[in-house]
Image (tube, grey):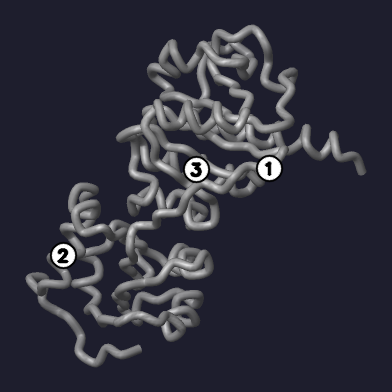
Amino acid sequence: MSATEVITSLQNAHVKRLVRLRGRREREQDGVILIEGAREIARAVASGLTLSAVYSTPELHSPEGETLAPTLHAPTHLLSRAAFEKVSGRENPDGLLALAPTPARPLPEPGAQAVTVVLHGLEKPGNVGAILRSADAAGADSVIVLGRGADPYGPNVIRSSQGSVFTLPVAVMTEDEAQAWLHARDFTTFACTPDAERAYWDAPLTGRVALLLGTEHEGLPEHWRRTDHSVSIPMDASRGADSLNVATAAALMLFECARQRRARRGP
């Protein structure tokens, strides 16, 4: 680590810039992302992302952070505890934060059994991050975020995904771009909507599959519901349940895809 002086002033230029970069517009203007946490930084580095700066407060480091910090090859700045807590977005920060150029990875060309998740209008970073984490765990091939929903590389999405955003190809597209990409690659699309007659476990979720999910309040717009298939997640309404969190719905769909693929391959 190259840092020798500890930044203590909350008016320091580094501190002020890090606070500013918590805003999406500011990150996009600078072309950078803000990664906080040892686990998330480790996954970013493992994915091949090059860090441009590291900010460290050793007294806050977790055991994972103590091991990771000396291995990070980037200009490193030491912050006092107060300065780090000022720039952190967490209640109990672990004293590691990094900046990196915004990733610009194209989606891979899909294989015969590719699964992609298409998110329409999701604005809550916690939901987007949880879906990325489930998609990674279930072996999905990519996630497409439509329009100006939650920033997939925002600090809160990175945190909620626990770094899965760096291990799973993620793209932000317009609706027209996404539809053209899926059509050109012969994906079969499945709109997840509560009024569909077919249960998701009865749908043929093999081959190239795109799972379409909208917001909990509004769901998918009509033109996205007019797709190859519509599926629902049956619920026991006897106690009044009529909806699921979108991240939960995504996890159910993703692991049903994985189950059907395993069944198709056989033991």
Q: CA distance from mark 1 to mark 3?
A: 24 Å
Kind of element beneath mark 1 = loop
Disc marking residue 130: 3
Report x, y in % for residue 230.
60, 14
Q: Nearer the viewer, mark 2 or mark 3?
A: 2
C-alpha distance separating marks 2 and 3: 28 Å
Q: Earlier in the sequence, mark 1 or mark 3?
A: 1
**Dot 2 lies on which element?**
helix
User: Residue 111, which numbered label?
Assistant: 1
Question: Which label sits in the foreground, 1 or 3?
Answer: 1
- Residue 23 appears left or right of 180: left
Give the label, 1 or 2, closer to the camera: 1
Which residue position holds label 2?
17
User: Pointer 1: residues within 10 angstroms few (<14), some, or many (20+)?
Assistant: few
What amino acid is found at the position of numbered circle 2 in the picture? Arg
Under tag 3, what secondary structure?
A: helix
Q: Say which amino acid is labelled 1.
A: Gly
Q: Which comes before the other along the chain, label 1 or label 2?
A: 2
Residue visible at 60% across and 35% down in the picture: 251
Near mark 3 (Cα within 10 A), the count class, few <14, some 14-19 or many ≥20, is many
Image coords of residue 129 (percent x, y): 45, 45
Q: Please rate how many residues cluster around mark 2, counting C-alpha atoms within 10 Å: few if below 14, some from 14 to 19, many from 20.
A: few
Name the foreground residue: 248 vs 174: 174
Where residue 49 sits, quadrant-wise, is: bottom left
